[in-house]
Every structure is written in C-alpha cells, then in structure tokens.
Amino acid sequence: MALKAVHVSDVPNLYQVPENSFVALYSSRFSKEVGRSSFKAAKFLVIGHRGNGMNKLQSSDRRMKAIKENTILSFNTAAQFAVDFIEFDVQVTKDGCPIIFHDDNILSEENGTIFEKRVTELRLCEFLTYGPQTESGKAGKPLMRKTEDGMITGWKVETDDRLCTLRDAFERTEPKLGFNIELKFDDHIVYEQDYLLSVLQSILQVVFEYAKDRPIIFSSFQPDAALLVRKLQGMYPVFFLTEGGTEIYYDVRRNSLEEAIKLCLEGGLQGIVSEVKGIFRNPGAVSKIKESKLGLLTYGQLNNVPEAVYIQHLMGIDGVIVDLVEEIMQTVNNLIKPSKISKEASSEGNQVQLDSKPLFSERELSFLLKLIPQLIQQ
C-alpha cells in the first residue's frame, strides 16, 4: 500500500455510543480517571493473552497447546479464573466484518499442498470455513501454522473451537469480563489513511452496538491506528503497544519507551503496553510513565513467571498480560492481595497461617531493579 500521511486533526469524531457504555468506565477495574486525560487502574490487573493463553505449537509445555487461542472457549475458560480482562486480536475481512485472529496470514493444507492467504483479503464466509464447523458432521479446512523457526505444522490443540467474530465475542463471552481489543495490522505494510479509517469504523460500529457495560481497552502496535481510534471515540481508553526497544522498526515511534511516552502525550492516549523485557531493561521509564499520568501494562513470556509478576506489582505497573492464566491468578491472589485473618480465630487466640509473601525494603527493591537489566541482557 502507498504511503500517505495521516492527519489526525482532520478526522471527525464518532461519539455514537450508547449511554450505558459509560458504566464500563466506572467498573471496579478502573478508577474514575478513565475516559479523561489520564488512566489509573483501581487494582493490579491480570489479562488473559488471547483468552486463556496463546498457542505455542513447538512448546513442550502442554498448557501452551491446551485450548485454541482467540476462541470463545478460550475466553470463557479464562473467565473461570476471575481474570479482569482478556486480550485478543481483531482484523477486518474484505467485506468489512471484524474477526478475531492473530496471524496476518491463514494457512491450510489440501492434498499435500499448503495454501496461504492474507486474512484481510478473505470474506467472512471464507474465513469461517477454516477449522471446526458449527454444522454437525461438516469438516472445515484444516488449519496450519507457521512456527517461530519458519516450519509449518498442523494447528493441533487438546481442545479445539471454531473461529469467531468480534460480535460473537460480545454475545457469547462472560459479560463481566473486560476486553482488551488489539487493533491488529501487518508490521510490514504502510497503510493509507482511508484504509485505517474504514477498518477502525467497522470495529467501532460493533463495539458501540454490543459492548453495553463491558469494560473495554483498545491497543495497537500501529501508531497511526492508535491515534485515530482515540480521535474517533472518547469513551474507551487507548494504549500504545511497544516492544520497548527490544525490536527496531522503520517507524521510530515504535523503537523505545521514550518514543511511546511522546506519542501518548501528543495524541492523548491513556497508556502504554510494553514488552516486559523493555521495562526490566529500562526500569527508570516506569517513573517517567507514571509522572506522565499514563497507565502501564506489560506482555511477554516473562509474565508467566510469578516472581516477575510480583516485582512488577512492586514497581507500580498496573497489570500484566499472561498466558498461564490459572497460575498467575494464584500468584496475584496469594502474593498481591492482602492476607485475610479470621476474626474468630484471632479472638480465640488461635494461630493463623498467613500466606507467605516476599518482602523487600526500598533499598532491596532498588538493588533488584539495578540487577534485572543486567540479567535480561544475558
């Protein structure tokens, strides 16, 4: 696609939002700062990555292949563990329907031949022919996936589920579960303004119609898309996704936490979602982000390590996007939420077993934050 500058100031606002959507902004997950110029979570948030966790087909850990990612089954499984939000990837089909799928291309096999198609070039009816089907006895096209090392393998999980649309997610997912909607675009394409507007308007139309009182956060690695969705609506917070300097791109706005802060402040975005390694390599950025009154969430494999999650809580990070939902929720419940002592036990003089929680002085925490960047570099 040809390069065309996006002039955000020229984009009209779309405040066509149901009145009860305001309820989402005042749920227990947020303080009343949401929707204004700043964001502040009322608690440490745990967000299920692509539902109950992404699929990593080459992993020896069966938990990474338990349930098909980005499906209604995965979303509702995560809800059973009382996560605050689920994160999922939204793209728009050729005929304008927002669907939930992570990869830019979808792969299938027929008679020993691999077929690969760009997701956004499919019509909805074709997209839904892949994988399990709703009609009993009908087989869909077998889904394949390209792994990190470039190999193509069958997308096999223990419990499969069919592909879904954004509308499906709103209608069939536990209504109290918040949605972190990632606006997914190809990293290697420079998008025209009209295309971005068309995609975002298709997504917002579904959100405005079906969100009701569900908490929503928008996020995107695509800087112009993040700025535009903030301009197009003022109801839901918009976060800029960044690798935090762990990867380098042609667009300099994606290359550091400092650039992310600058983008958010200039565009009125409410927060940043950073690769956790970017935060651990540059822990000083956390205070800068907080001083800028921006929210801060993280993602990445280190967020599946309980100790890494707890340290982030101590650092003042607002929440984590995780794959091992059940395990990390246990960590949050045991280490982060205050321990409760039975009044009856204490009044009777009985000993009460408290949850063990690592305690760090300011000096010890400062030492850890200085040590972590060196460990991450190894």
Image (spheres, rainbow, N blue to C red):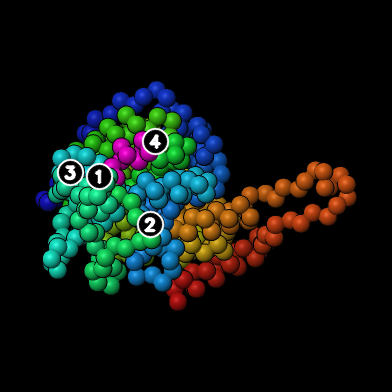
Amino acid residing under circle 1: Glu
Which residue, given by chain and number where applicable, does mark 2 sit on? 159
Whole-percent x and y of residue 101?
Answer: 28, 51
Q: Earlier in the sequence, mark 2 or mark 4?
A: 2
Regarding mark 1 in the picture, which secondary structure is present there?
A: loop
Whole-percent x and y of residue 21?
Answer: 41, 28
Which residue, given by chain and number where applicable, does mark 4 sit on? 236
* Within-10-Å neighbours for mark 4: few <14, some 14–19, many 20+: many
- Does 351 lie within the magenta span? no
- The residue closer to the viewer here, 328 or 375, is 328
Q: Earlier in the sequence, mark 3 or mark 2?
A: 3
Amino acid residing under circle 3: Cys
43 versus 284 height, above or below: above
Left or right of 107 in this view: 148 = right
What is the CA distance from the residue labelled 1 to the residue labelled 3? Answer: 14 Å
What is the CA distance from the residue labelled 4 to the residue labelled 1? Answer: 36 Å
Regarding mark 4 in the picture, which secondary structure is present there?
A: loop
Question: Which residue range is magenta in the image?
Answer: 164-172
Q: Which mark is residue 125?
A: 3
